[in-house]
Image (cartoon, rainbow, N blue to C red):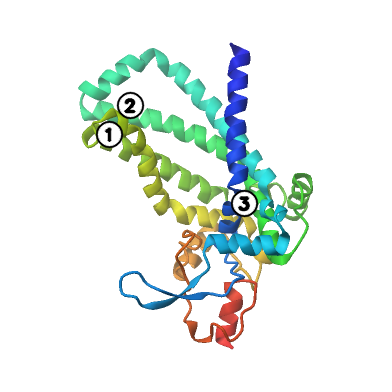
């Protein structure tokens, strides 16, 4: 039985790793968008309703095409190894902690179900808080353990901007981070990531259970409620994801993480405040309709293939 469980786990995590690897180019391009790297010139497009002309950045497929043109096909998978390692390690830790909680709560599962269906709302809230707290603890532990690989992944990717080679392997990345930032460097951007995860878990869980309890009564449809709610909630927690990835690069010694390609941030709160003031808290959120924000009067006068800041410099000139 133990061997079957181990084999099943290996197949499960292995299939997840394969899917992660296959979709990696999309995540790679999105990270470069999040740090503000826009190497392709904006294009003229028309809005759907009023047919007003606006400037938009090329979509994610064109962005991936640019990466392939510069680095070749294998270049699309820069950072894939630490990404797979982060995903597998985080999922493994989270799964094991959740399994222990479920094992302890199996004895009271029948009374819990009755409480959810028959008892008053206060009892349901208590049960909800207990289960969601367990899920939160498991998820946060998984995030903390895997976050060093997340930092390595982000820095491997953004090397594309400055053409550095410091983070070409996991081992060289560990050495570089430790020498440049110390132990805390492995946890750059961890706090906003944890806050975003906690908010997402609690809001998604609460809304899912409320909807399934009072709105969606069909059992077959209820299984999709969590995914739909999670997608909506992720839209509101996206700024925490953005700040996490920006802080993983900020002051890292890479060209993408220092002036003039990136502002200097003293903390993740300062980063979020600065991005909010600039109206950039949704930067990189869209993969297709990506509006060019600055006034496009000098758009095609000179285009530098580095970042938005390069275009801004052209505007000032």
Q: Which residue is mark 3?
A: 188
Give the quarter of the figure containing the N terminus.
top right
Q: Is residue 92 above or below residue 276?
A: above
Say which element carries label 2.
helix
Q: Which residue is mark 1?
A: 212
Place of residue 224 in the rendered image (x, y in percent of width and height, measured from the top left)? 35, 36
Place of residue 64 in the rendered image (x, y in percent of width and height, measured from the top left)? 60, 59
Spatial CA span between label 2 and label 3? 34 Å
Q: Residue at x 51, y 45 (%)?
A: 194
Residue 207, can we see it? yes
Q: Residue furthest top?
A: 1
Say which element carries label 1.
helix
Q: Residue at x 62, y 26 (%)?
A: 10
Of 297 and 184, the residue lying toward us: 297
Q: Earlier in the sequence, mark 3 or mark 1?
A: 3
Of 73 and 167, the residue lying toward us: 73
Neighbor class of circle 2 (other Cα within 10 Å; few <14, some 14-19, many 20+) is: some
Place of residue 232 in the rendered image (x, y in percent of width and height, measured from the top left)? 37, 49
Q: Residue at x 66, y 39 (%)?
A: 85
Say which element carries label 3.
loop
Q: Give the numbered dot on residue 127.
A: 2
Q: Nearer the viewer, mark 3 or mark 1?
A: 1
Place of residue 152 in the rendered image (x, y in percent of width and height, measured from the top left)? 68, 49
């Amino acid at each position: 039985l133990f061997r079957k469980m181990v084999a099943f786990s290996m197949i499960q995590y292995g299939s997840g790793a394969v899917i992660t690897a296959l979709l990696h180019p999309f995540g790679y391009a999105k990270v470069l968008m999040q740090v503000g790297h826009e190497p392709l010139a904006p294009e003229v497009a028309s809005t759907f309703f009023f047919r007003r002309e606006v400037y938009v950045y090329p979509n994610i497929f064109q962005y991936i095409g640019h990466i392939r043109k510069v680095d070749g096909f294998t270049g699309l998978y820069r950072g894939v190894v630490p990404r797979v390692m982060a995903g597998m390690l985080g999922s493994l830790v989270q799964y094991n902690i959740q399994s222990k909680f479920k094992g302890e709560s199996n004895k009271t599962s029948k009374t819990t179900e009755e409480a959810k269906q028959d008892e008053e709302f206060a009892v349901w809230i208590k049960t909800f808080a207990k289960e969601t707290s367990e899920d939160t603890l498991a998820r946060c532990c998984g995030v903390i353990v895997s976050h060093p690989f997340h930092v390595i992944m982000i820095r491997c990717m953004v090397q594309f901007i400055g053409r550095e080679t410091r983070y070409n392997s996991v081992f060289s990345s560990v050495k570089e981070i430790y020498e440049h930032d110390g132990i805390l460097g492995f946890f750059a951007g961890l706090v906003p990531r944890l806050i975003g995860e906690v908010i997402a878990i609690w809001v998604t869980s609460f809304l899912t259970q409320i909807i399934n309890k009072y709105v969606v009564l069909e059992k077959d449809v209820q299984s999709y409620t969590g995914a739909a709610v999670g997608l909506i909630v992720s839209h509101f927690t996206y700024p925490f994801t953005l700040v996490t990835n920006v802080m993983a690069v900020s002051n890292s010694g890479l060209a993408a993480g220092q002036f003039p390609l990136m502002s200097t941030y003293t903390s993740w709160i300062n980063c979020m405040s600065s991005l909010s003031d600039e109206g950039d808290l949704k930067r990189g959120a869209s993969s297709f309709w990506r509006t060019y924000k600055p006034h496009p009067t000098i758009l095609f006068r000179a285009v530098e293939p580095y970042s938005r800041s390069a275009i801004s410099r052209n505007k000032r000139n």
